[in-house]
Image: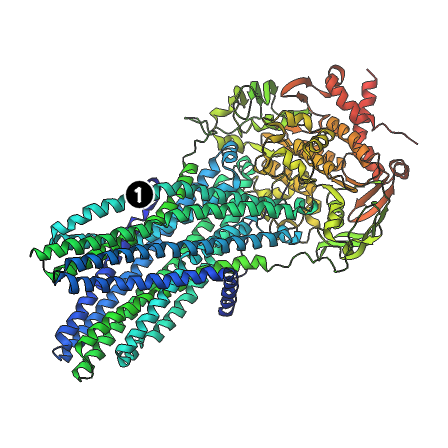
């Protein structure tokens, strides 16, 4: 029983310029770990650029100095030199790309790791209110975009900057005047870039957001395929998918268009630049201020100047998509974690299992009070049963005890210590829980049980399985204990999954045992066997049992009857029957029917 | 990859338009240097200001046309590639909807999600890049070759060595890298799977204080992904430097042999300069092509994964002439049905099950954990197909009935309650799409859910799922029941659907159900005798076989297993009236 969430439309999320700067700073923070390697890349890019420039120069030299004068010995020497340079160039290109990719992958890995590690300390509330698929999308699809940018954009930017600087220097040396003229278009370029990138950033943000929603929808649909098929909802689901698919397509088109028009726009501005240079150069030449040759060379350099400028503009676009994705990733990393343990938090050790709830009230949402003024005291070794209609608040009590949530008011004590003053780790380590939703991982049966106590030996694992009455069916699986369970545990029945969960809790050997409807899907005979084992286990341990089967709770030391968030009756089975209240009615109605039949049968 | 290109066909207009518009931009681009040169040669050199102005204006005009071409190409290529991506996504999602549970199990959920989004995005990128760059590179390449040949055909022979060498380098690099990219995507699947498990099972992780353990698990998957990525990319990036080297060496060769040619008077100096220029141009275009091929390599791995889904043989599908007649009765018969998940006769979960459920009766199935109860009822809506024997519904073999028709005649409450995000009303409406509000409320009443729903601040409009309310297990089950019964199906399957519901409520549900649905065949799988006592027929399963069959009274008299269960449950129930 789980409640997978799908994405709903969040409020419109707009990336502001200041935010973009921050994001870049954070991205840079991840990269800066590899400063040395980045410097190496920069260095190699410089070399490659230099070597690339040398190429045409040497070719010219070969022709002028050796081919024309027919100096074949000299030509040979020069060609060998060129060959060496070309080899060097290829090596340098290869090394620079390889190093950059290395840096990019390491950076990405660290970002992914940090995001995941952050997930592990977020409060339960975060997971209950978000779509699984959307979170997955941020750690994969969004990171992919960042990866693209890091892998190629950085080297491009380096190389463009180097070529640009070199060319500008040459241009200034040739003719400061003409350089000034050709720079006229630069501010226009900057403004245009700014305008275009505003749009690309917005659309990339939107694209990734919709992709996250699509991911969420797909994940929920595929996880729940059985229900989809059972209710013949395939067509309806396809319809809904198409709606989001279309939305993704439309925003994707816009994003791609804007990122694609950068090139042509820059080109036009270039050509306008040429035109201006040619015109003014021509006019200046006519005025005899500069020579024709200078203009020719200058125009050449202008082209060399504008190509890297275009590249830079293009790369800024790629960086936009990286920023949009990084934003989404950092959103997760910026989430408030579970409040840390207070500095003077106590490590709970040798837990006796004394549990007390004092005036505890709780609600998931402000206007929906789930628990009202809960008071009870469980002494070490007692078995406490929680009974009551569904939705009455029983599972919530458990959630509070494990500090998945904290109460609105009131306190909870274990061994006399307020649980908010105990380290979460030691608190949860002292509890062994079998939850309503049996969760198993797609690992071997053995590993799943071992999850209860990671250092347990195989023997201990099998012993726990035996106690839980699980060994029989485990051995009947194709590879016994080593059988790998499928994702979502589809190949086991609910009852079998519960048995594994119980084995897991048994292995954990906790001081306080919590069984939340732990055997609801197990047949009654198997349950009996488990109970016998559990009784042994529960000896000396405080146990909380939530169940509907009165056979399960009959033997409890204290039964708390909870209705509408309040404890309306308490006592043991016999006492409660005497009271002839809620419990009595519950009990009687379960067996009234059977008892009638017993009477009927007795007459045979 | 080629198979998938068929998804591009409907969008042939923008697909063709993009390169054509790019062609316009390229032509305009290429003409600029010539115009520039003419400004210098004819205008400046001759101090012809009006010529300069005119040609300048012409340059500007052509530049604007070029820009229009370039922008147009951007628009057309975006439209084509995004539509392509959307079409493939559609196709894959549709295919997933028709996959059987067994098919889906084979792929694993997280892998399917990765393929649907990440892999298809790769393909989309490649289409986009190709459309944008596709014209420039080949144009420069072919143009370069033509000019080189027309200059000096013999010298061009050098290219007959370098180009095949180049092609070989590119081909082998790509071939070797494809499996590496495939492997990389698999590692991505794994990372996704670990993330997903942690998202679903976060309560478990926290309860057992396993955050560190999970972090390690993730770190392993993460590192493996990184290494796989590095391996793939490190291989493919050797391609460009090698291409560069081969072409540069070609230039060296040109200079050498060209030098001799000039010596022998077969070529002019100016020609060699031009020749080198063309070789450089060819080099440049080949690098561009090389770059695209890099992405194509990666995309090919993705294409394979996508095709794998699209080409899957669906094992549960309609027969050739499916019967579309809706179910008129809920009569179900099992004739010597055996079933094993792997189709292996040695690992049968159900063995020779035969029984008859007349229309309108309630059949209860009892049995120990893992005895095959859920599996049995899963065969009725054809979630799985029998290994041998046959399942008859409405006197017809289920395999002969159209799947949608078959399932439309059933209401199913599966063992683990799955609800989807949306309102409570939406969820109940899954059972009957055109249900009116009254019908929804009525179904909820029967399922004993109406009261608690009304106690929620937003009642039936309460959002479930993301930003949803935390419902208890029993509440979810009751909504699932309402969902299943709302269309009053001829066959109702309740698989342990009241396990989280207390006995009182369960009895109310059963009573209300009987009044609500008359004439439907109801299958109940349960653990409590109290749930099954009133059934018309009880089947006791043990290890895949029917051990006993009969009414409660009959079984009580004749079946030791049933007596056992009964006693175990009743035994403690006998009151010790103090």
Q: In which quarter of the image is the C terminus of chain A?
A: top right
- Residue A190 in the image: above or below residue B103: below
- The picture places residue A297, in percent across and down from the top left corner, at 22, 72
Horizontally, residue A257 falls left or right of residue A8, namely left
Q: Which of A76 and A554 is in front in this view?
A: A76
- The picture places residue B63, in percent across and down from the top left corner, at 24, 67
- Residue A361 in the image: above or below residue A516: below
- Residue B433 in the image: above or below residue A194: above
**Pointer 1: what residue?**
B171
Based on the displayed image, in which of its 4 quarters is residue B519 positioned? top right
In this view of the protein, can residue A536 be seen by the observer? yes
Point 42% across, 49% down: residue: B121
Based on the displayed image, in which of its 4 quarters is residue A471 positioned? top right
- The color scheme shown is rainbow
Q: In which quarter of the image is the N terminus of chain A?
A: top right
Horizontally, residue A572 falls left or right of residue A491, namely right
Q: Nearer the viewer, residue A514 or B520?
A: A514
Based on the displayed image, in which of its 4 quarters is residue A268 positioned? bottom left
In this view of the protein, can residue B113 be seen by the observer? no
- The picture places residue B65, in percent across and down from the top left corner, at 24, 65
Point 17% across, 77% down: residue: A292
- The picture places residue A492, in percent across and down from the top left corner, at 62, 31
């Amino acid at each position: 029983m789980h409640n997978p969430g799908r994405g709903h439309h969040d409020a419109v999320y707009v990336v502001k310029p200041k935010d973009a700067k921050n994001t870049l700073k954070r991205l840079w923070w991840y990269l800066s770990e590899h400063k040395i390697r980045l410097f190496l890349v920069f260095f190699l890019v410089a070399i490659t650029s230099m070597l690339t420039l040398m190429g045409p120069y040497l070719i010219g030299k070969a022709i002028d100095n050796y081919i024309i004068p027919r100096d074949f010995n000299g030509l040979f020497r020069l060609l060998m030199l060129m060959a060496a340079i070309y080899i060097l160039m290829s090596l340098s290109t290869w090394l620079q790309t390889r190093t950059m990719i290395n840096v990019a992958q390491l950076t990405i890995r660290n970002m992914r790791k940090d995001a995941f590690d952050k997930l592990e300390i977020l409060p339960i509330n975060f997971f209950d209110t978000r779509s699984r698929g959307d979170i997955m999308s941020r750690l994969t699809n969004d990171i992919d975009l960042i990866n693209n940018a890091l892998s190629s954009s950085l080297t491009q930017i380096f190389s463009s900057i180097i070529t640009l600087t070199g060319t500008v220097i040459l241009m200034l040396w040739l003719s400061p005047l003409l350089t000034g003229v050709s720079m006229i278009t630069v501010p226009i370029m900057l403004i245009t870039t700014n305008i275009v990138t505003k749009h690309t950033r917005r659309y990339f943000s939107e694209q990734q957001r919709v992709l996250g929603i699509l991911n969420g929808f797909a994940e929920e649909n595929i996880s729940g395929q059985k229900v989809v098929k059972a209710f013949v909802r395939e067509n309806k689901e396809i319809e809904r998918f198409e709606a989001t698919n279309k939305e993704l397509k439309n925003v994707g088109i816009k994003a791609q268009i804007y990122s694609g028009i950068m090139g042509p726009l820059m080109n036009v501005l270039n050509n306008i630049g040429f035109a201006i240079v040619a015109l003014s150069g021509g006019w200046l030449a006519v005025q005899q201020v500069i020579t024709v040759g200078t203009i020719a060379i200058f125009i050449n350099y202008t082209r060399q100047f504008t190509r890297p400028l275009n590249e830079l503009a293009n790369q800024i676009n790629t960086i936009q998509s990286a920023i949009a994705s990084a934003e989404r990733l950092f959103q997760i990393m910026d989430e408030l974690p579970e409040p840390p343990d207070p500095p003077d938090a106590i490590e709970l050790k040798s837990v006796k299992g004394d549990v007390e709830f004092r005036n505890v009230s709780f609600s998931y949402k402000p206007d929906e009070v789930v628990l009202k003024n809960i008071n009870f005291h469980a002494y070490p070794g007692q078995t406490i049963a929680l009974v009551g209609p569904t939705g009455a608040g029983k599972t919530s009590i458990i959630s509070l005890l494990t500090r998945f949530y904290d109460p609105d008011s009131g306190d909870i004590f274990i061994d006399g210590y307020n649980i908010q003053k105990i380290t979460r780790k030691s608190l949860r380590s002292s509890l062994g829980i079998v939850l309503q939703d049996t969760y198993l991982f797609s690992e071997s049966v053995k590993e799943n049980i071992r999850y209860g106590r990671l250092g347990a030996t195989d023997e201990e694992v099998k012993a726990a399985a035996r106690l839980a009455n699980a060994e029989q069916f485990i051995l009947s699986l194709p590879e016994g204990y080593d059988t790998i369970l499928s994702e979502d545990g589809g190949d086991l029945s609910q009852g079998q999954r519960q048995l594994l969960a119980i084995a897991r809790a048994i292995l954990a050997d906790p001081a306080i045992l919590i069984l939340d409807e732990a055997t609801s899907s197990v047949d009654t005979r198997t349950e009996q066997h488990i109970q016998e084992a559990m009784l042994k286990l529960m000896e000396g341990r405080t146990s909380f049992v939530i169940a509907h089967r009165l056979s399960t709770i009959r033997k409890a030391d204290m039964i708390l009857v909870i209705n509408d968030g309040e404890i309306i009756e308490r006592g043991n089975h016999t006492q409660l029957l005497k009271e002839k209240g809620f419990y009595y009615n519950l009990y009687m109605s379960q067996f009234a029917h059977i008892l009638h039949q017993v009477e009927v049968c007795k007459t045979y | 990859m080629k198979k998938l290109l068929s998804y591009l066909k409907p969008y042939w207009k923008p697909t063709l338009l993009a390169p054509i518009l790019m062609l316009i931009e390229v032509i305009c681009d290429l003409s600029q240097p010539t115009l520039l040169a003419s400004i210098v040669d004819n205008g400046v050199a001759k101090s012809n200001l009006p010529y300069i102005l005119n040609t300048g204006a012409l340059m500007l005009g052509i530049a604007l046309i070029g820009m229009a071409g370039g922008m147009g190409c951007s628009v057309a290529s975006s439209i084509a590639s995004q539509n392509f991506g959307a079409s493939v996504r559609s196709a894959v999602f549709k295919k997933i909807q028709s996959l059987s549970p067994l098919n889906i199990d084979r792929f694993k959920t997280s892998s399917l999600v990765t393929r649907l989004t990440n892999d298809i995005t790769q393909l989309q990128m490649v289409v986009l890049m190709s459309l944008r760059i596709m014209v420039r590179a080949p144009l420069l390449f072919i143009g370069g070759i033509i000019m080189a040949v027309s200059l000096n055909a013999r010298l061009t022979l050098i290219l007959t060595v370098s180009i095949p060498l180049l092609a070989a380098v590119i081909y082998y690099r790509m071939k070797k890298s494809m499996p590496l990219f495939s492997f990389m995507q698999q590692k991505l699947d794994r990372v996704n799977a670990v993330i997903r498990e942690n998202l679903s099972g976060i309560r478990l992780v926290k309860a057992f204080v396993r955050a560190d353990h999970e972090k390690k698990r993730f770190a392993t998957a993460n590192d493996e992904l990184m290494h796989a990525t590095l391996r793939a990319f490190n291989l493919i990036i050797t391609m460009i430097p090698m291409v560069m080297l081969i072409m540069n060496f070609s230039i060296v060769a040109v200079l050498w042999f060209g030098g001799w040619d000039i010596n022998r008077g077969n070529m002019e100096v100016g020609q060699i300069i031009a020749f080198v220029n063309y070789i450089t141009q060819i080099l440049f275009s080949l690098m561009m092509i090389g770059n695209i091929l890099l992405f194509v390599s990666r995309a090919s791995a993705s294409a394979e994964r996508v095709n794998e889904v699209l080409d899957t043989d669906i094992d549960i599908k309609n027969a050739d002439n499916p019967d579309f007649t809706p179910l008129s009765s809920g009569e179900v018969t099992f004739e010597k049905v055996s079933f094993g998940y792997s189709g292996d006769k040695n690992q049968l979960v159900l063995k020779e099950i035969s029984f008859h459920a007349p229309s309108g009766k309630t059949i209860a199935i009892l049995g120990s954990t893992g005895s095959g109860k859920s599996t049995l009822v899963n065969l009725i809506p054809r979630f799985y197909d029998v290994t041998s024997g046959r399942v008859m519904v409405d006197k017809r073999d289920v395999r002969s009935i159209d799947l949608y028709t078959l399932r439309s005649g059933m209401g199913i409450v599966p063992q683990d309650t799955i609800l989807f995000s949306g309102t409570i009303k939406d969820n109940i409406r899954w059972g009957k799409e055109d249900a009116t509000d009254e019908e929804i409320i009525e179904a909820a009443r029967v399922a004993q859910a109406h009261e608690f729903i009304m106690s929620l601040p937003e009642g039936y409009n309460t959002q479930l799922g993301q930003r949803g309310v935390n419902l208890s297990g029993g509440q979810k089950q009751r909504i699932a029941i309402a969902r299943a019964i709302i269309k009053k199906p001829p066959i109702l399957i309740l698989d342990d659907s009241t396990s989280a519901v207390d006995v009182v409520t369960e009895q109310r549900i059963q009573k209300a159900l009987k009044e609500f649905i008359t004439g439907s065949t109801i299958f109940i799988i349960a653990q409590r005798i109290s749930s099954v006592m009133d059934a018309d027929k009880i089947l006791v399963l043990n290890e895949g076989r029917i051990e006993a069959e009969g009414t409660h009274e009959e079984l009580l008299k004749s079946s030791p297993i049933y007596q056992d269960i009964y006693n175990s449950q009743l035994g403690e129930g006998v009151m010790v009236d103090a």
